[in-house]
Image (cartoon, helix red, strand yellow):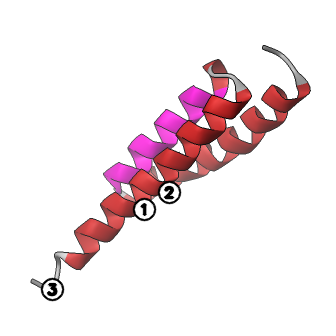
């Protein structure tokens, strides 16, 4: 579990997840906050390849939730 790929992926996705968490906390943006928590938790416990796939899915999910909320504002 503690291979070089796991450590690099964990650092990379954990940093992105913590950035999402801080952004969501300061901007009161719930999808970004939840996405950051998910990405940070996954970066600690899941092997490298599934971690990357889950984090990419979380990024897409956060983008979709924010985009969906912004498109309904003008209606």
Q: Quadrant of residue 47?
A: top right
Instruction: Pinpoint residue 27: horizontal percent, then vertical percent.
Output: 40, 61
- Whichever of callouts 1 and 2 sits on the residue coming sooner in the sequence is 2
Direction from residue 54 to residue 33 in the image, left or right:
left
The alpha-carbon separation of the residues under discs 1 and 3 comes to 18 Å
Among all residues in the image, which is located at the extreme bottom? 74
Circle number at residue 63? 1
Q: Which residue bears the numbered disc 3?
A: 74
Q: Determine the residue positioned at 58% across, 34% down.
A: 40
Circle nearer the viewer, 1 or 2: 1
Instruction: Pinpoint residue 35: horizontal percent, then vertical percent.
Output: 45, 44
In this orientation, which residue lies closer to the viewer: 60 or 39? 60
Helix, strand or loop at disc 3? loop
Q: Residues within 10 Å of mark 2 (few under 14, many from 20)?
A: some
Q: Is residue 67 above or below residue 39?
A: below
Range covered by the magenta-colored residues: 29-43
In this orientation, which residue lies closer to the viewer: 27 or 65? 65
Q: Which residue bears the numbered disc 2?
A: 23
Q: Is residue 38 magenta?
A: yes
Q: Is residue 39 magenta?
A: yes
Q: Residues within 10 Å of mark 1 (few under 14, many from 20)?
A: some
Query: In terms of secondary structure, what is the magenta stretch mainly?
Result: helix
């Amino acid at each position: 579990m503690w291979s070089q790929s796991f450590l690099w992926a964990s650092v990379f996705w954990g940093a992105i997840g913590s950035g999402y968490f801080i952004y969501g906390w300061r901007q009161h943006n719930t999808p970004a906050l939840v996405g950051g928590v998910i990405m940070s938790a996954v970066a600690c416990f899941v092997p490298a390849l599934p971690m990357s796939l889950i984090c990419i899915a979380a990024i897409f999910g956060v983008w979709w939730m924010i985009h969906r909320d912004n498109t309904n504002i003008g209606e």
